[in-house]
């Protein structure tokens, strides 16, 4: 079975985000970029499926400009066998991403597609679900455990009320939650080996997908600064302040 993993290049989780002076977007110049943390978990899970003999090949796919090859090389160093970059200079919306991934799914025919539950830049949480609809495949989102048994995947999902278990027929789409696994670090020999692993570049035009934007960003602003807190001596003072100062009681 082939496992396809969608890997997104995002601003590193440790970077403090700044908004551009003209409020058009987030500042990306000279900012450290990394694999979206949920996609790193997706790669780790796919590699573990290969190590346990369930998967034969792990393919990492990323949609973006040449820079996202850096994240694909990291995915290769973490254990993916080959990589595909869908080359586009635009920042695409989840529906366009899902359509492009669906084109790769049609070409590669994977038994399982693993995505992150969300990208930490847009926080969309849409691509996996849209891909499942486009590909006509069952989905197990927010996975904290995946067990593949025969032609079925048993997925434990993190839902509001606790954990939900679903059994889905393969081929299927799974999106990863934080507790699914703890990703490994790439070792130096594996980073060197990754440089020689195959990385195919496909243009969006070659896939014949309309990636036109449907949304426009009017303005990007930083969240309001939080007011400093105050210390209160006791509960009575707290209640008084909630009544008089905050006006919430
Ligand atoms: P989102 O719906 O944007 O929150 O993203 C959910 C998941 O979709 C991510 O964790 C990735 O697995 C995948 N994804 C989103 N954008 C891209 C991209 N440009 N390239 C590859 N995978 C992506």
Image (cartoon, rainbow, N blue to C red):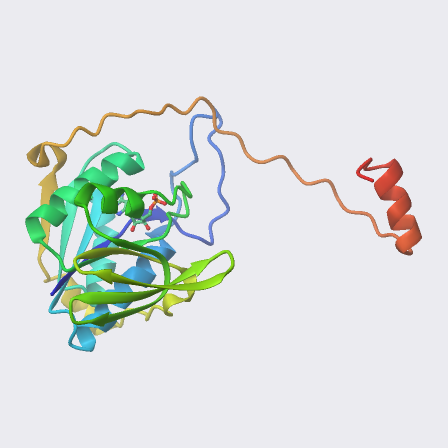
Quadrant of image for the C terminus: top right
Which x, y percent locates residue 65? 22, 40
Q: Is residue 27 left or right of residue 139?
A: right
Find the residue positioned furthest to the bottom: 52
> Residue at 88% of width from left, 36% of height from top?
244
- Residue 2: percent from the left, percent from the top? 12, 62
Is residue 26 or residue 3 the one in the foreground?
3
Horizontal and vertical percent position of residue 184: 32, 71
Residue in the picture at 16% in, 71% down: 150
Query: Which quadrant would residue 209 be assigned to in this image?
Result: top left
Tell which of 43 and 235 is nearer to you: 235
Residue 65 seen in render:
no
**Residue 127 in the image, given as x and y percentages of width and height:** 30, 44
* Residue 97 visible in the shown view: yes
Comparing 94 with 20, the one in front is: 94
Q: In the figure, is residue 126 to the left or right of 206?
A: right
At x 41%, y 43%, the residue is: 121
199 lies above or below 242: below
> Which quadrant of the figure contains the N terminus?
bottom left
């Amino acid at each position: 079975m082939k496992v396809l993993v969608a890997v997104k290049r995002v601003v590193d989780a440790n970077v403090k985000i700044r908004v551009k002076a003209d409020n058009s977007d987030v500042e990306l110049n000279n900012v450290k970029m990394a694999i979206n943390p949920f996609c790193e978990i997706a790669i780790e899970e796919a590699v573990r499926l290969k190590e346990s003999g369930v998967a034969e090949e792990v393919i990492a796919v990323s949609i973006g400009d040449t820079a996202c090859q850096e994240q694909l090389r990291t995915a290769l160093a973490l254990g993916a066998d080959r990589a595909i970059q869908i080359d586009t200079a635009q920042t695409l919306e989840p529906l366009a991403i899902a359509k492009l991934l669906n084109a790769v799914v049609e070409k590669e025919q994977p038994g399982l597609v693993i995505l992150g539950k969300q990208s930490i830049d847009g926080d969309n949480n849409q691509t996996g679900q849209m891909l499942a609809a486009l590909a006509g495949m069952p989905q197990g989102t927010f996975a904290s455990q995946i067990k593949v048994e025969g032609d079925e995947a048993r997925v434990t999902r993190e839902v509001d009320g606790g954990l939900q278990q679903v059994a889905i027929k393969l081929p299927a789409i799974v999106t990863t939650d934080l507790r699914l696994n703890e990703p490994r670090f790439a070792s130096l020999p594996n980073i060197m080996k990754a440089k020689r692993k195959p990385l195919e570049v496909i243009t969006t035009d070659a896939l014949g997908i309309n990636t036109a934007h449907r949304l426009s960003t009017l303005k990007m602003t930083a969240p309001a600064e939080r007011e400093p807190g105050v210390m209160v001596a006791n509960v009575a003072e707290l209640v008084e302040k909630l009544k008089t100062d905050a006006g919430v009681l």
